[in-house]
Image (spheres, rainbow, N blue to C red):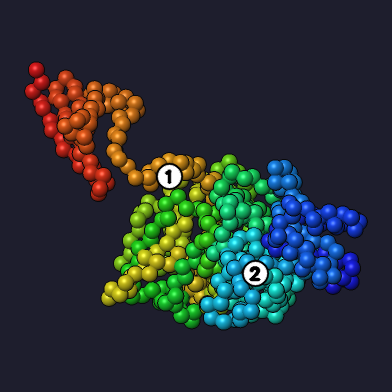
Amino acid sequence: MISPPQSTYSSPVHRPSTPRPVSTPSAVTSIWSDPRLSPKIRDACRVAREAGHRYLWIDSCGIDKTSSSELTESINSMYKWYGLAEVCYAYLADVPSGEDPRADQSAFRESRWHKRGWTLQELIAPFDVVFLAEDRTQIGTKLALVDLVEEITGIPEGALIHAKSLDEFSVAQRLSWAAQRETTREEDRAYSLLGIFNINMPTLYGEGARAFRRLQEEILRRIPDLSLFAWEAYIYEDFDTDHDLIQALQNVRWFAIRKRGETPLDARISSFARGGKIKAIPHDDVFRRLELTDLPAPEYTFTPHGIRTKLPVIPLSLALPQQPAEHDDKESHWYLVILGCEHDDYPGALLGQACVIPPSESGVEYLYQGLMAVMPIPQRGAVWPDIFPLSPATIERYREHIQVKTVYISQPERTTPLSRDVLRRPHKTLNLVLLKETRDALRAQGYTAELQGPDEDHPTTYWLTLANDDQMITVEYQYTLLDFTLNALGAVDRHLP
């Protein structure tokens, strides 16, 4: 990967642009003397020239961000650009020169550079990364500081020094590296991960959180790894892998709770913060452990109803002790979905994700996430796991009850962020509205409806009057903004004039 200095190029992290050769000495002179050249760019050029490089990628020039096609091409190419660079210079403007980066609470440990979304690929893709302090002096290289960088970022050494292919790390592991990172634009949290997953997709600024949903869908198409569904990853820890799940939960009460509206793809990137210890298991290995003749390889079909797939499941009624037990959605069917992955702390145990399927007469069964409230007896406080280790003993006990179900992952719901934002704002008044459909429904029952108020004497009171041929009903509503409460008092008059 090392080329002679006279033919190499380098890249100052954080964003590269297309390298532009300087063809003549006069051109060099004009660039150096150009007052529009920022000190950051001038110093980056100086560092690269002193190291013997002829070409430099610079983040603030070379990409026309007003061109959506060029921006998309550049974002989809960045990981490759960094990977081809002989060296990347990571400029840490908040790290003073001369400090020991390994010292407790060093500026290097706390640098914003480690917390930015775009710098993840800039750290991983190049083989050689040189960290520069605020005065552009060298702090150290990625190779020399690899143990410290691993400690700071949670990225394993094998990924940092290219001893392992990124494909050897599960989807959940790779997403965990980005879970605590931030970007200015919400979409960039997803776009900055394209190279990490070797995926190309268009950039659509303005789509917000849907960018990560699109990335997840592309991951499903390309990577046969169900750890994508293991977000949150609250593992039930009071568990001995030598026992089956019922033995582990003998002396507990448990309560199954549906995460309202949350599908296996409704995660945020930050939801994978605990995913660093989750490893994917090859399908052949899962097939061997479950011994199911009808276990298909993971496939996903995109339909108007959502994403259709087949997953192995264990009915929750069999997997967990039944007395005492409760569900918040008794009409639905509860399962542990068997994910083809393991947790480092529970080797040999596949992971079971608590999920719920609401009743469906049409056969289109939607899969939603669930979690469990597990309360020891006698009561010592509850834990809230959503994933349970399924030991070989558990699999053996329930092997004949494992089902392969066809389920749908629903389309993302339409979001109205403006409406949610309005609800969060401080309110000076509370406005009650009588909807037309409500009036029509009351009229169908023989009632006329009138909503009045507030007035000067009663600034926080509304009156709803319902009348028919036999009676008049008056409901008085009073609200209190401080407590955000609404009290109603009703009265019925059966003696109309």
Q: Label 1 vs label 2: CA separation?
A: 39 Å
Which of the two discs, 1 and 2, sits closer to the camera?
A: 2
Residue at x 48% of width, y 81% of height: 242
Q: Amino acid at mark 2?
A: Glu
Instruction: Name the residue at the top extreme.
Output: 497
Report the disc number at residue 421: 1
Q: Which numbered disc flags the more N-terminal residue, 1 or 2? A: 2
Residue type, numbered disc 1: Asp
- At mark 1, the secondary structure is helix
Q: Position of residue 378 (x, y in %)?
A: 27, 76
* Residue at point 14%, 24% (across, down): 471
Q: Which mark is residue 6?
A: none
Is 276 positioned to the left or the right of 380 in the image? right
Quadrant including the C terminus: top left
Judging depth in this view, the residue of 440 and 132 nearest the camera is 132
The N terminus, quarter of image? bottom right
Q: Quadrant of residue 198?
A: bottom right
Label 2 element class: loop
Q: How many marks?
A: 2
On the image, numbered disc 2 is attached to which residue? 134
